[in-house]
Image (cartoon, rainbow, N blue to C red):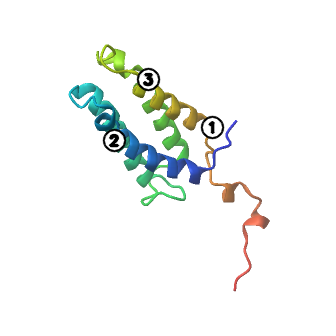
Amino acid sequence: MRFIPTRVHGITDYLAGIVLFGAPWVLGFTDNAAAHWTLSGAGLLLIISALMTDFEVGLVGMIPMPLHLGLDLVVGVLLVASPWLLGFSDRVWLPHVIFGAFEIVASLTTRTQPRESLQSPAMQTRPRA
């Protein structure tokens, strides 16, 4: 069931991107390059994809929302698996799994179109001032 509005998803992408980018410093694992850049890279990817997505908070509008959500799903799965795939699970794994699971859930529960486009055509017309 898709219940998260695209606007909320977009704002969350920007916030999560900032959190992901800064998490290695806050959580103290910048000494492990793989663990560090997996989260920081995912954060940068979230921000860039949000900027390029065709939704209320995107700037460029090149990526359709369904593709954006698919990208979020892939990033989430890779984040969850990254500690074991990249060999740093003995050092840190919980932030990657938590943020990855968050991305997976967000990708599966966000609407694929803004609410305005889900309304009937009669509801979309607004009187001109």
Question: Left or right of 105: which side holds 46?
Answer: left
Q: CA distance from mark 3 to mark 2?
A: 16 Å
Disc 1 designates what residue? 109
Tag shown at residue 80? 3
**Quadrant (top left/top right/bottom left/bottom right) for the C terminus:** bottom right
Residue shown at the point (40%, 27%) measured from the top left: 96
Q: Helix, strand or loop at disc 2?
A: helix
Judging depth in this view, the residue of 27 and 55 nearest the camera is 27
Q: Is residue 80 above or below residue 64?
A: above
Could you say where residue 49 lies in the image, as x and y percent from the top left?
41, 47
Say which amino acid is labelled 2: Phe
Residue shown at the point (29%, 15%) measured from the top left: 87
Q: Nearer the viewer, mark 2 or mark 1?
A: 2
**Quadrant (top left/top right/bottom left/bottom right) for the N terminus:** top right
Could you say where residue 121 lies in the image, as x and y percent from the top left?
75, 63
Could you say where residue 126 lies in the image, as x and y percent from the top left?
72, 74
